[in-house]
Amino acid sequence: MAHEVKDENLAEQGQMNIEYAEQNMPALRAIRARFEKEKPLKGIRVGMALHITKETANLVRTLIAGGAEVAITGCNPLSTQDDVAAALAKDGVNVYGHKGESNEDYYRFLNKVLDFNPNATIDDGCDIISEIHAKRPELLKELIVGTEETTTGIIRLRAMEKDKALKYPIIAVNDNLTKHLFDNYYGTSESTLDGLKRATNVLFSGKMVVVSGYGDCGKGVALRAKGYGSNVIVCEVKPVRALQAKQDGFRVMPIAEAASLGDIFITVTGDKHVIDTHHIEKMKNNAILANSGHFDCEINVKGLEKMAKSKRRIRWQLDEYVLEDGRKIFLCAEGRLVNLAAAEGHPSEVMDLSFCGQALALEYGIKNKGKLKAGLHNLPSEVDEGIARLKLETIGVNIDKLTEEQKRYLASWQEGT
């Protein structure tokens, strides 16, 4: 089959959701209009592993407008929006994924995309890249460029690069200023709390919220939780970030100390077992755990399963674990990224910037075919700034311009006191 989705009858609702998102993605619409004229991706087969959401569908349509053929699967078993997948299937897109798929199906779908023989990849979490290197190395000779969307994927790619294992050029879209300063900070913060509230309907006001990780995602989550009236503790391993958290007005301490204090725990680190069993042992009755990192390893879910004498699904995307001493621990979204598993992911307005970055990174890589060595690359700053400028233009915001005198001054060193 050219597609494998949960229910093709959901396509009409999916189409309406895609159209609704498109209204709030004016910069990507502008790029699509240019792509339709110039066809910069003509003849390119793009293999994608991204969250199949209404926003991603607009990126897919932009790449197709640019001349590309596209095959897409989800990058997390719980993040696919089934109505959107159905709408893409109706469009004739090679789409594979459904919400709640098994790990076996997850990797089967990844390989369906790789069977498409892509010569460019778009990834979120590095799974499609690692699958190519580990199991489908014959595809490497045809690959021109890839892009990576998220912090967790960049961590993995840097490890690959360090080990000299990365065999084709990858553009770190996550490292665009127009991505991590907006998507990570504004998008993750709003969508994480949205997912957590949908899963639990908890009142944040007056609660002690423990945020593990104070990168761009953690900073936003901590600020939004504070805005809801929560008391916030930040747990961090990097001294500069920990100092930032302290200066931003948050309590800072190790997770081992925070474990007995928190009511709600949110992990946003990209690391493994940030909340482990010995932390859970110290937690209050009715503590709520949620993860907004890409993979489901930040909370030791398997360890929690072993600790519990019983488990039941009491709400959609909320599991209750009863420990041996009778305490209850609530886990959102199976420990997977709560903002997509229990909600709809980032708002369309912020994904407008991220997906402009994906589209333009792909175009840049194709234009520079053969010039980029295998390894991790940043999108040129002028392209990144161009995304911000385009976004400002499409939302009707004008900014100042340097005068010729100011340009000369900034370019010189002779003029001082």
Image: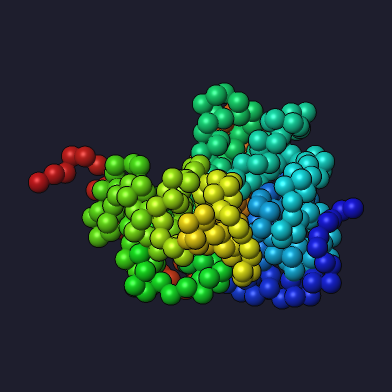
Q: Is residue 383 visible?
A: no
Residue in the picture at 40% in, 60% down = 284
Residue 52: x and y in percent read 69, 59
Query: How many numbered circles are shown?
Result: 0
Q: Nearer the viewer, residue 247 or 185?
A: 247
Residue 144: x and y in percent read 68, 36
Q: How is the image coloured?
A: rainbow
Q: Is residue 415 left or right of residue 50?
A: left
Q: Nearer the viewer, residue 144 or 331?
A: 331
- Residue furthest front as drawn: 325
Residue in the picture at 54% in, 29% down = 161
Q: Is residue 364 above or below residue 385?
A: above
Q: Nearer the viewer, residue 190 or 386?
A: 190
- Residue furthest left as drawn: 417
Q: Is residue 178 left or right of residue 67?
A: left
- Residue furthest top as drawn: 164
Residue in the picture at 87% in, 53% down = 2
Residue in the picture at 57% in, 63% down = 320
Residue 373: x and y in percent read 59, 28
Residue 201: x and y in percent read 51, 74
Q: Is residue 56 left or right of residue 110?
A: left
Q: Is residue 254 above or below residue 131?
A: below
Q: Nearer the viewer, residue 396 or 22?
A: 22
Q: Is residue 99 visible?
A: yes
Q: Quadrant of residue 132?
A: top right
